[in-house]
């Protein structure tokens, strides 16, 4: 391999490395889009629905009940379509970063063979995007399920969910596991993954990442780019965990009281 080939390949590899190092920036853009969609879903289910309801009341209603329901259904469908588009954008970012890393590794190990790098990158991306095992079905995507919850819609059971491990979320139709997928016990200092939506205990996930593991530990999740930049404190889940701990404490105290009562009766 000539020095020029070596310099060229090393230069391209360096460029690809710089591109992949901007992962946090790409993820943040997807997270921002997700935030806008979720906020819109919340407003639609609360403010818009109430406004539309008022238009059907009174002696001279502007809309009939059927017209209101049809309009809301149409707006919800539009938002669900936008949600899927945002998820698809996130998947494209995932495929791009995966392909960039693969191409970079190829360049550093193939001895400088000539190739069309742009075509190779597109080839890797298409292969990654078209492989169904790399992504969840939309109805199982955590973000899509969050939007449906904000819209007040019933959710189908998520793949791999066990009702015994879930608790009902206050004011919503969805269920959210409060056990860490790594420790399998109640979450401690919950950290939410902004990319795939899964939640882990802080200490457990940091140890997991520090051991150079990159696939999300939740069974069935196709996030293979797990990093610290994807994690943020999850205050909502932390609140639910505190409530669950109090509930378990009350149940434990109740069981203890019942046991003591039975023991007293037997002594009598």
Image (cartoon, grey):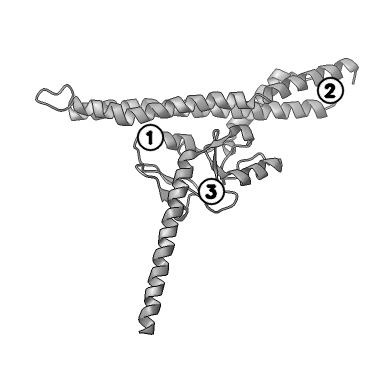
Which disc is residue 150 wearing?
1
- Helix, strand or loop status at disc 1: helix
Quarter holding the C terminus?
bottom left
**Furthest residue in direction bottom, as rendered:** 268
Q: Mark 3 points at which residue?
A: 187
Q: Earlier in the sequence, mark 3 or mark 1?
A: 1
Confirm whether residue 163 shows in the render: no
Camera-side residue of 253 and 137: 253
Drawn side of residue 43 relative to residue 124, left or right:
left
Q: Earlier in the sequence, mark 2 or mark 3?
A: 2
Camera-side residue of 66 and 249: 249
Q: Name the residue under label 2.
A: 112
Q: Which of marks 2 and 1 is in front?
A: 1
Task: Using the numbered discs, state the Cα–Cα distance from disc 2 to disc 1 in whole angstroms.
Answer: 52 Å
**Furthest residue in direction left, as rendered:** 59
Task: Tell me what residue is drawn at x 35 percent, y 38 percent.
Answer: 153
- Helix, strand or loop status at disc 3: loop
Residue 251, picture quadrant: bottom left
Task: Using the numbered discs, state the Cα–Cα distance from disc 3 to disc 1 in whole angstroms.
Answer: 23 Å
Task: Tell me what residue is drawn at x 19 percent, y 27 percent.
Answer: 54
Confirm whether residue 129 shows in the render: yes
Q: Is residue 160 above or below residue 110?
A: below
Q: How many labels does the image show?
A: 3
Residue 254 coordinates in the image, percent (x, y): 39, 65
Quarter holding the N terminus?
top right
């Amino acid at each position: 391999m000539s020095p020029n080939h070596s310099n060229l390949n090393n230069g391209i590899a360096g460029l690809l490395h710089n591109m992949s190092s901007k992962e946090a920036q790409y993820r943040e853009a997807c997270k921002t889009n997700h935030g806008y969609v979720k906020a819109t879903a919340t407003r639609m289910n609360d403010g818009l629905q109430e406004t539309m309801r008022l238009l059907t009341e009174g002696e001279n209603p502007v809309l009939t009940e059927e017209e209101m329901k049809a309009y809301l259904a149409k707006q919800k469908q539009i938002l669900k379509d936008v949600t899927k588009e945002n998820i698809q954008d996130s998947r494209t970012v995932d495929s791009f970063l995966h392909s960039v890393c693969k191409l970079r590794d190829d360049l550093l190990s193939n001895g400088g063979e000539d190739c069309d790098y742009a075509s190779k990158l597109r080839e890797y991306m298409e292969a990654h995007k078209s492989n169904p095992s790399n992504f969840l079905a939309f109805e199982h995507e955590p973000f899509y399920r969050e939007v449906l919850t904000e819209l007040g819609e019933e959710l189908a059971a998520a793949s791999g969910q066990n009702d015994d491990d879930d608790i009902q979320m206050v004011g919503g139709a969805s269920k959210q596991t409060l056990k860490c997928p790594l420790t399998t016990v109640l979450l401690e200092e919950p950290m939410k993954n902004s990319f795939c939506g899964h939640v882990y205990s802080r200490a457990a996930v940091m140890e997991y990442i520090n051991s150079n593991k990159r696939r999300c530990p939740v069974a069935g999740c196709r996030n293979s780019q797990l990093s610290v930049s994807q994690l943020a404190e999850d205050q909502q889940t932390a609140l639910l965990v505190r409530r669950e701990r109090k509930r378990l404490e009350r149940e434990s105290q109740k069981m203890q009281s019942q046991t003591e009562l039975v023991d007293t009766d037997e002594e009598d």
